[in-house]
Amino acid sequence: MNAQGILIAGGYGVVGRRIAADLAPDYGDRVVIAGRNLERAKTVALAVGYGARGREIDVTVPESIAAALDDIAVVVSCIDQRERKLLHAAVARGLAYTDITPHLTELGRGAAYESIHVAARASGARVVLGTGIVPGIANVMVRAVADALGGAEQIETSLLLSASDVSGPASFDYFLQELAMPFVIHVDGADRSARAFTDPRPIEFPLPIGVRPAYLFPFSDQVLYPRTMGATTALTRLAIEPPLVAKLLAVAVHTHAARVMAIEPVRHAIAKLRAGSEPGAAGMFALRVDVQNQRKTSHATLLGRGQADAAAAGAAGVVRCLLTGERLEAGAWMPEQVIDPNPFFLRLAAQSLNVERSPVVLCSA
């Protein structure tokens, strides 16, 4: 029998279980929820229903990965992989693969990205890196706007998140590390050094949010746009609601307090305090991408509630593309290279996530 399973590694996490819930009504027992805790995986699979199954996987152990990939056609990783063993195993087997974890920055420089692409081409694997919101939905929005403009010389992405929104512990831990992490931005064809929560700019998000200050942030999509879209400027900013939280984070970076917050024992202590607090309701999030090409500009926006739900919808949309083979040749790609915007946006709209695109206008001289 041909392998048909859809393995969601980290499938009982905040986003993983939402991806499973999105896919299970259509794919039933092909959905496999996997993690180190087999009983937890089985419990979540039972809650998801439609015949979804649980499976054990430890992404640090090659033998565990090999066993978990038995009968699998598509892999969705919701697990932070420092060594990317699951990715490399999927590529070696010629499987389809996508990944919602944020560590893509190193792939944009040096030979790492190209080596994965070459290996995937050789094995027949179809890999889409960076799904979720940013990177992910934002990249497809950039593609749609760039298509209308005939290219993308400048790409600026702005994401607004609520401080009270639901996010997984791994995501929060990485966020604390990012506060102290120097990173590189690409402006006018040259690389420049930057730090998180600096250079605030007023961004007009969709109503009822309106204008909010957004700060430079090391989202990995901006690293790859010069390669995938030929952009000479690529910047991504983050806004936090309420704005006072973002101001406090900016102060932490400026005073170097963020370096203390990034130390592992301190991060873990903060995470424990956060885990012990009352969970807040899913807050609103907003996304805006601005693209300029040859004196023409346009933008697209998205407004929703619950970043975890939106990230899952974006990842599930990519999985559906992998399953149907839409425009996907063997190789390693970013979403803007291979995902057709219109059917992707229709899938988002079914989840009440409506992308709005502005008309093309001429830039002032």
Image: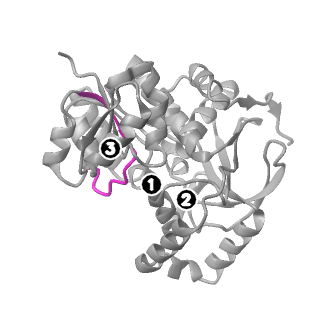
Q: Dot 2 lies on which element? A: loop
**Image position of 347 with respect to 190: above or below:** above
Crowd around label 3: few <14 · some 14–19 · many ≥20 (10 Å): many
User: Could you say which is closer to the camera, residue 334 or residue 50?
Assistant: 50
Please name the residue that numbered disc 2 is placed on: 218
**Dividing the image into 4 quarters, which one contains the N terminus?**
top left
**Dividing the image into 4 quarters, which one contains the C terminus?**
top right
Residue 28 painted magenta = no
**Image position of 120 with respect to 57: above or below:** above
Please name the residue that numbered disc 1 is placed on: 105
User: Could you say which is closer to the camera, residue 86 or residue 167?
Assistant: 167
Q: Which residues are magenta?
A: 72-84
Image location of residue 151, percent across then percent down: 63, 31
Q: CA distance from mark 2 to mark 1?
A: 8 Å
User: Could you say which is closer to the camera, residue 107 or residue 245?
Assistant: 245
**Disc 3 or disc 2, which is closer to the eye?**
3
Three-letter amino acid code at the position of disc 1: Thr
**Disc 3 or disc 1, which is closer to the eye?**
3
Query: Would residue 316 be found to the left or right of residue 157 on screen?
Result: left
Three-letter amino acid code at the position of disc 2: Pro
Q: CA distance from mark 3 to mark 2?
A: 32 Å
Q: Dot 1 lies on which element? A: helix
Find residue 226 and name its label: none
Residue plotted at (49% across, 30% down): 22
Q: Kindly indicate whether the residue at mark 1 contacts the one at mark 2 (C-beta within 8 angstroms).
A: yes
Residue plotted at (26% across, 45% down): 86
Residue 79 painted magenta = yes
Crowd around label 1: few <14 · some 14–19 · many ≥20 (10 Å): some
Please name the residue that numbered disc 3 is placed on: 41
Residue plotted at (43% across, 51% down): 104
